[in-house]
Amino acid sequence: MAVNLTDITASFSRNGALLAPGVVDKVLHKSQIKARLIRRLLISLIIFPVLFAVLYYGLFAADRYVSETNIIVRSVSSRRMTGLEMIFQTFGISRAVDDANAVQNFMLSRDAVQALETRLPLRKIFSDPHADIFSRFPRFWLPKNDSFERLYEYYLDRVTVVQDQSKGITTVRVVAFQPEDAKKIAEALMQLSEEMVNRMNVRAQRDTVESAQASVNSAVQDLITAQKNLAQYRNRELIIDPSKNSASVLDTITSLATENAQVLAQIQEMKKLTPNNPGIAARIVRADSLKARIDAERDKLAGSDSGLATKIETYERLALLRDIAEKGLTNASASLETARQEARRQQIYVEQIVAPNLPDQSTEPERIRMIATYLVVCSMLSAVLWLLTAGAQEHTN
Amino acid sequence: MSARPFSFFDTRSRRSSLAVGGRVQARVVAALMIRDAMGRYGHENLGFFWVIGEPLLLTCGVMALWSITHQSHNSAVGVVPFALTGYSMLTMWRLIVFKSMHGMRRSANLIFHTNIKFFDILLARSLLETIGILAAFLIAYLPLWLLGFMPSMNDPLALFGGWLLTAWFAFGFGLIIAAATELSDALERFIHPVMYLTLPITGTFYMVDWMPAKIRDILLYSPLVHGSEMFRSGVFPPDVVTMYDPWYMVAWCVALTGIGLPLVLYAQRHVQLV
């Protein structure tokens, strides 16, 4: 059966047809228009930013100069690493270098900007007449663009401090519109961070040495007190060294006892040989008095409260206290000396490996790279958007 | 009826001009991409958006898991950006390669359209993954960045450039795989284990800087490591040391495409229709 195309189209145009004449065309046309619109939007999403990038980076963007300096922050003491730490070190999992972090933090701080402002006309440098309107300091599109906070934000865009943790080298990059300015800022930053480190050093030294010094002082005080107590005791008891005194008493007792024994022996001897000897009575008196003397001496040694034994106890306690105080002082002095040495060793230095250079050619902005960035980023974004719109369109159909 | 401005078969496509040819090619590839997505996910629930949703689920799942179980080794490299960047790349690489297996055979019925070549089919498939997973990455990146879990992009050129180069590399590799699986069915058995065993040289699980110098030199032979380092250097701040050479990757990509294209041309004579 031959089908006539005009018949088919005509059948749509009659009254009561399923679709009114031209509707199919209209619907198709509408979706085409929509598709075309989306496509144009997506293409313009690529073209306009790239065009802007080409124009801006090709014609308007002002030359910027980069002054770079490398520093290393180090202390005299070399930290000894244990085995496990060394293994982690090789895998790059190590503790951050605190001192370098402090310096890096300082250079990117408001303090540093404030200090820089006192030394250099920072605002004037960043709003250089050579600078184009997009990159110059008071950013015209921001509200309150002249405040210190804005300056700080701008400063963070112009100064980068990157720390290579494996090598320990910190790279400071300063970008400005004049080569001299970039160099000046970099040099001022170096000075400021050196001063900051020195302040830290003085403080650390003072802190460690001060506490050791304080313990030495208190040890000296202890020793003086102990010595004083001992001297007072001696004066009160009229005695220099009770243990020596007791020794002399013991000596006396010994000689008395010897003599007593001799006398007693003589008496016995005489009683056997000549019982009626009148000398015996005299000898007995002597022995008795010797005995009495010995008892008296014994009393002196360990008898009542005033006996030497109690005195020795008090004396030895005081003497022990003095010895302890003496030892304390010796230890404190030694640790003061160590603290001094430690403080000397722990000093950190900011060492410049590379002095800030004076750039003779502008290296920023990287024009080609920026244009390529715009091109790649915009194409990828519009591809993603295309996928999303295509998905949305499929979904609504 | 007015002339349809976007018809495949209108007179303009017969003009043998490079621009028109390119336009037709673009339209074919775009249509194939949509067809591929539709064929895979249909109209059900999210439908087409599963192209983005599937990798998004995977990367976000891994990211959540890692952020619970792993701790950050390094203050500058957070777990969340590390996992997100690594897994986005890995997903793209794996999906493009796996989709190329028997890639010609599966869409062989399309080849009866004059404007469609096998190359277009393979290209469309790879492009769909490239753009879909990139969209997934960006969709995950945006809220995480706003919440402060991700650093702001350090270098967008490196980010997108690394992505594109890796995609190209995967596409070139996929061309070879597509042709080779067509020529030998046994080869397909090898691809899964090989892909699994080469996971360590994809650069997903480490930064090259963390490695000892000897291992570093070996790893940097792998173009995938270059790609993931480049991608990561686009996200992480400059304190994080990354090592890559885009030209090394380009050389690999050109070489793989140069081998893959003739192979595909050769293999298309042997495609078995299913």
Image (spheres, grey):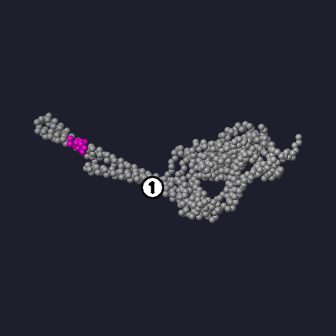
Q: Residue furthest top?
A: A272
Instruction: Give the x, y percent position of residue A301.
Output: 24, 43
Q: Which residues are magenta?
A: A295-307
Quadrant of the frame with the C terminus of chain A: top right
Mark 1 residue element: helix
Q: Which of the pair B87/A24 is nearer the observer?
A: A24
Instruction: Give the x, y percent position of residue B238.
Output: 61, 52
Please give the residue where the numbered disc 1 appears in the rendered image.
A206
Residue drawn where x is 79% and y is 49% of the image = A26
| The quadrant where residue A114 appears | bottom right
Q: Is residue A344 above or below residue B102?
A: below
State left or right for residue B161 relative to residue A125: right
In the rendered image, residue A20 lying in the magenta stretch gets the answer no
Instruction: Give the x, y percent position of residue A22.
Output: 81, 49
Residue drawn where x is 64% and y is 44% of the image = B59
Q: Is residue A396 above or below residue A270?
A: below
Q: Residue furthest bottom?
A: A129
